[in-house]
């Protein structure tokens, strides 16, 4: 073992250590997620911003690409684990050029783990979330909600002690843009929320249908 280690290039030794540590952390996180301990379901103060809670829940700064939050602790660990192992394996034949496929594989792994987590959260939400509990709640627009129910947007709403991302429509004559605060005034059979800008009552919203 010592002889094998000493025969490695210094760069390979660094890659090996990082890959082993990242793989261990990734395995632990997958186990915790599988048993339901990976999510932070504790209550937060109502004034806590949605971005802050998303950051806490996902363990990162919440950079979203193609609807997936990839710049998180989980995403970085997946990037390091997969990227370092592949770079380590390809170092002998192609030397430092191995960084190219290693980085590409690491990015793919970060997206993959993000997609897996998002799918898991959706499964949990579909089984436990009672959408009618969101009526009367304040939400924040995540994707612009088109005017007069001409399309669906998305909002983040705090319901059942966690923030969830749900599709939403509005009867407002003006689109409600990303970042604006809205009130959930009704729900639809397909699980879509009906939201309104502040100052619009539920009765007014229904009359505009």
Image (cartoon, rainbow, N blue to C red):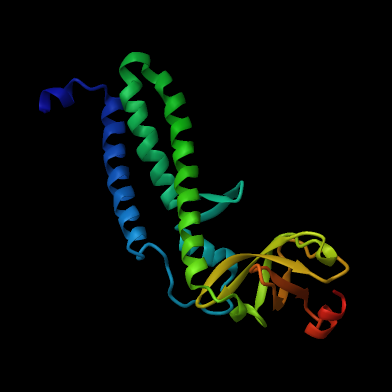
Q: Nearer the viewer, residue 92 or 68?
A: 68
Number of numbered tags placed on the structure image: 0
In this picture, residue 16 sits left or right of residue 145: left
Residue reaching furthest left? 2
Up/down of 118 relative to 112, above or below: below
Identified at 64% across, 69% down, the residue is 191
Q: Tell me which corner region of the image, top left, top right, bottom left or bottom right, holds residue 109.
A: top left
Task: Point out the image quarter for the N terminus.
Answer: top left
Does 51 appear above or below 5? Answer: below
Horizontal placement of 175 versus 126: left or right? right
Q: Nearer the viewer, residue 142 or 13?
A: 142
Q: Would you place residue 63 above or below residue 40 in this image?
A: above
Could you tell me which residue is drawn at 73 percent across and 60 percent down? Answer: 152
Residue lying furthest top in this view?
93
Q: Looking at this rendering, what residue extends furthest in the front direction?
A: 189
Asked if 50 appears above or below 94 in the picture, the reply is below
Question: Relative to 6, is 196 on the left or the right?
Answer: right
The percent position of residue 45, horizontal first and vertical second, equals: 52, 79
- In the figure, residue 13 lies in which quadrant? top left
> Which residue shows up at 85% across the image and 82% down it?
204
Pick the quarter of the image with the C terminus. bottom right
Is residue 21 left or right of 194 when viewed as pictured? Answer: left
x and y percent of residue 102 in the render?
A: 42, 29
Give x and y (percent) for residue 164: 56, 67
Q: Examine the image and state in which quarter residue 203 appears.
A: bottom right
């Amino acid at each position: 073992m010592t002889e094998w280690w000493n025969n490695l290039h210094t760069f390979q030794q660094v890659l090996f250590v990082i890959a082993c540590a990242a793989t261990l952390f990734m395995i632990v996180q997958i186990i915790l997620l599988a048993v339901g301990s990976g999510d932070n379901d504790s209550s937060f103060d109502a004034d806590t911003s949605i971005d802050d809670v998303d950051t806490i829940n996902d363990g990162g700064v919440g950079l979203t690409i193609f609807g997936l939050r990839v710049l998180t602790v989980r995403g970085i660990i997946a990037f390091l684990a997969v990227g370092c192992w592949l770079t380590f394996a390809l170092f002998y034949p192609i030397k430092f050029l191995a960084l190219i496929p290693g980085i590409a594989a690491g990015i793919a792994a970060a997206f993959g783990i993000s997609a897996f987590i998002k799918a898991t959260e959706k499964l949990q939400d579909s089984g436990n979330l009672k959408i009618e509990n969101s009526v009367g709640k304040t939400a924040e627009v995540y994707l612009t909600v088109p005017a007069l129910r001409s399309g669906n947007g998305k909002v983040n709403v705090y319901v059942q002690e966690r923030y969830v991302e749900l599709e939403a429509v509005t009867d407002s004559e003006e689109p409600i843009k990303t970042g604006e605060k809205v009130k959930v005034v009704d729900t639809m059979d397909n699980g879509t929320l009906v939201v309104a800008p502040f100052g619009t009552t539920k009765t007014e919203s229904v009359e505009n249908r």
